[in-house]
Structure formats: structure tokens, C-alpha cells
Image (cartoon, rainbow, N blue to C red):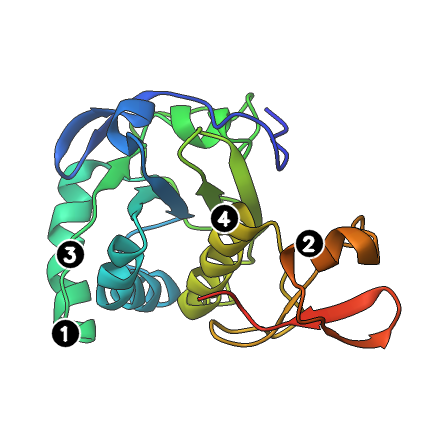
Amino acid sequence: MNLRIGNTAPDFEAKTTIGRIRFHEWIGNDWCILFSHPKDFTPVCTTELGSMAKLNSEFTRRGCKVMGLGVDPVSSHMEWSHDIGAFAGALPDYPIIGDDDLRVCKLYGMLPASEKAGPEIRTAEQNATVRSVFIIDPEKTIRLIIAYPMTCGRNFHEILRALDSLQLSEKHTLSTPSDWVDGEDVLLPYAWTDEQAKEFYPDGWYAPMPYLRFVPQPK
């Protein structure tokens, strides 16, 4: 499946480290981060799942659930969690899907439909494209997709920043500039005329160019 921003996130049932879940039901009325990794007991992924374990409370504070996904059985994820905790000082406190039949990976376009699962151990190289992040909103719409190569560890603070931007835009119809972090000035919608903008921001804005209009981030 070739998923794009704006598509409905495919629903599925899967085995996870907290038991069997139905994805949409598990998300409920929250936001969701679904992030995948190609192989348990590998160096980059160990650092990544540890980083997410340390940051998960920040996602929770923003009404966002986190779901990991790996192309290994749940039993392997559970065993690997001890290494992650020993390295990062925090055990993964979010569920991880055991996608050893490749069903969810294929459903989300991370592996081709022709890829075969079997009893043999798959290598990280075979699963190299299972390195994606999806941000999904409470309506189950995909709002962000990022894919990474195996050698590049993900920056989970950036994923948190992107969630902040999406949630701000959802609430206030505003955009965020490059390198924005929570608390900095934000941008008025390009489609708004100055007259429309004055209805919401009567105190005006800073505009280095007519179409580049900054206002303080709403509290």
C-alpha cells in the first residue's frame, strides 16, 4: 500500500508486548506515534527504543500514545527490552508489535507485498525499509510520514517537535517556521488576507515580507 499524508491509517489486529490489540480501538481518541525498526538486538535500534522510552512521558502528556513495531516475535521484543533498559536507564513502557508475519509492514508500505515471511530468521538488511515513523491523529488520519536508512538513528525530540507543531496547527490554524520549537513565534496562514488576520490578531504581526507574517504563539 502506498500511503500518503491525509490517508486513513490502516486498521489491523496484531500481537504486541501488552497482548493482542486492534489498532484503531487502541488509539481511541488520542494521537499516536507508530514507529518501526528492522531488527531486535541491533545497535542503532537499541539506542532509538531507549530514547523513546525516556521521552514517552512527554508524548503521553500531549495526549499521544506510542506504538513500536518490529519484524521479530513478541518474545524477542520482551527479551531485548532488558538490554534497552540496561543501556538507556529506562525500559520501553509502550507496546511493541511482533510483526514476524510481515502483515503490518506490508499494510503500511514498508515492505513489498511479494515479500515472504517464513520460519527462517530474517536479517536486518532484508528488513531495511522497516524504518518509518507515522504520526496519526484522533480521527485516524496520517499527518506525518518519515522514513530513515538503517545507519541514521532517529531524533525523537524532532518527532516530539513535529507533534507540537501539528497539534498547534490543529487548534489555532497556524503554521510553524523552520527550526521552530514550542514557545517561539508562529506563522499566519498564507491563504488569509490581512483583513481576515486582523479579526484574530488585532494587535498585528511582524512581516519581513507581505506573505511572511509572524505572531506570538498562542498560550
Considering the numbered disc 4 on the image, is that residue within a helix, a strand or a loop?
helix
Front residue of 190/129: it is: 190
Question: Gap between marks 1 and 2, in whole Å?
Answer: 50 Å
Front residue of 70/7: it is: 7
Question: Gap between marks 1 and 4, in whole Å?
Answer: 35 Å
| Marks 1 and 3 close (CB-CB < 8 Å) | no
Q: Quadrant of residue 139?
A: top left
Instruction: Name the mark nearer the viewer: 1 or 2.
Output: 2
Q: Residue at x 52, y 25 (%)?
A: 8
Considering the numbered disc 3 on the image, is that residue within a helix, a strand or a loop?
helix
Q: Residue at x 18, y 45 (%)?
A: 76
Q: Is residue 217 above or below residue 73?
A: below
| Marks 4 and 2 close (CB-CB < 8 Å) | no
Considering the numbered disc 2 on the image, is that residue within a helix, a strand or a loop?
helix
Q: Residues within 10 Å of mark 2 (few under 14, many from 20)?
A: few
Instruction: Identify the residue under disc 2.
Output: 199
Q: Residues within 10 Å of mark 1 (few under 14, many from 20)?
A: some
Q: Earlier in the sequence, mark 3 or mark 2?
A: 3
Q: Earlier in the sequence, mark 1 or mark 2?
A: 1
Q: Is residue 189 above or below residue 187?
A: above
Instruction: Name the mark nearer the viewer: 4 or 3.
Output: 4
Instruction: Name the mark nearer the viewer: 1 or 4.
Output: 4
Instruction: Identify the residue under disc 4.
Output: 171
Instruction: Identify the residue under disc 1.
Output: 89
Question: Gap between marks 1 and 3, in whole Å?
Answer: 11 Å
Question: Gap between marks 4 and 3, in whole Å?
Answer: 36 Å
Instruction: Identify the residue under disc 3.
Output: 81
Q: Position of residue 199 (x, y in %)?
A: 69, 54
Q: Earlier in the sequence, mark 1 or mark 4?
A: 1
Assign the N terminus to one quadrant of the image: top right
